[in-house]
Amino acid sequence: MFKAILFDVDGTLAETERDGHRVAFNRAFADAGLDWNWGEALYGELLTVTGGKERIRFFIDEHQPEYPAQSDEAAWIAGLHKAKTKHYLELLAQGAIPLRPGVRRLLDEARAQGLRLAISTTTTPENVTGLLEATLGKESLDWFEVIAAGDIVPKKKPAGDIYVYALEAMNLRPEECLAVEDSANGVLSARDAGVPVLVTDNAYTQADEFNGALAVLSDLGEPGQPVAVRTGSGPKSGYVDCAYLHSLAQAV
Ligand code: XBP
Ligand code: MG
């Protein structure tokens, strides 16, 4: 029995990476007097590492090996990341990041049909609150039984910890849920937790490997704005609705 949808955030609910997180990182680097600038292409490479702090760490190791080590590097990176989060929240509050097609419609339909909702994301909890408030309004925070985010679990995606966290908090079995993800790391994470997963890819993840996904679509679609089906069977209506999710869940 399909009971719940577990949503990823970045790249799934909204295209947050290129115009949100990346811009915020660059502003934090400028604040810190660093001449680092993450262009769109480089950022695509850095996105293979989940977690903002972990991504800065990776960038230093791979692209700034000469950069003098800080006395307390972890604290220094955490400080940079905190500044980045502040810039990101400002961008969200300015309405810079809209929801992807079909997200609002599917959330409304799922709630109307009594499907339970949760979030399983790598991003920092405030970023989730900021995005939901800016795009769906404060009351939308209550739509999600669980918002599992950031450092709340020991291992980030592709490990399944953040999905296991949501399942335990909702007292649900993996097969009673469906995850909606955008990236290979996200699919690996959901599958690691045993959760069936639907992919809506984006410019940064189109070339990813989505082994184990039930289907890969261009987005959730809207009436009159049909999805493009990359792999698997697409929705009869042309857009992702609850009937389609039920059919996917039954096919598991
Ligand atoms: C994607 C991530 C996050 C964001 C940046 O999360 O890997 O790290 O890129 O957010 P999701 P932070 O699981 O939602 O796709 O800087 O807060 O980590
Ligand atoms: Mg994502």
Image (spheres, grey):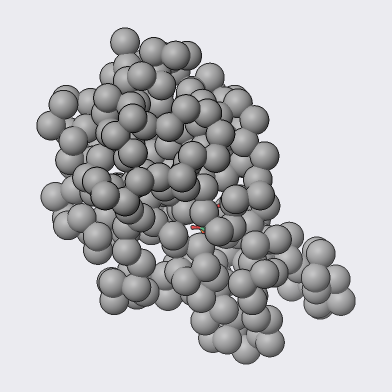
Identify the residue at image location x=66%, y=85%.
Answer: 34
Quarter of the image where one finds residue 38: bottom right
Task: Using the rendered view, name the quadrant where residue 173 is placed.
Answer: top left
Count of numbered circles in the view: 0
Query: Taking 34 as reference, is 103 above or below it?
Result: above
Residue 119 position, x and y percent, is 37, 39
Q: Position of residue 226 (x, y in %)?
A: 35, 46
**Viewer-proximal residue among 16 and 214:** 214
Q: Say which residue appears at 63% left-offset and 57% top-offset.
A: 47
**Can you say whether 131 is above or below 33 in the image?**
above
Give x and y (percent) for residue 39.
64, 76
Is any atom of residue 82 visible in this view?
A: no
- Residue 10 on image: x %, y %: 46, 53
Q: Is residue 48 visible?
A: yes
In the rendered image, the quadrant that contains the N terminus is top left
The furthest residue to the right: 66
Residue 10 lies left or right of residue 13; in this view the side is: right
Left or right relative to 13: residue 204: right
Instruction: Say which quarter of the image contains residue 157.
Output: top right
Asked whether 121 or 124 is in front, the reply is 121
- Please say if 129 is above or below 35: above
Q: Residue at horizontal 19%, vertical 48%? A: 140
Residue lying at 65% horizontally and 45% vertically, measured from the top left: 208
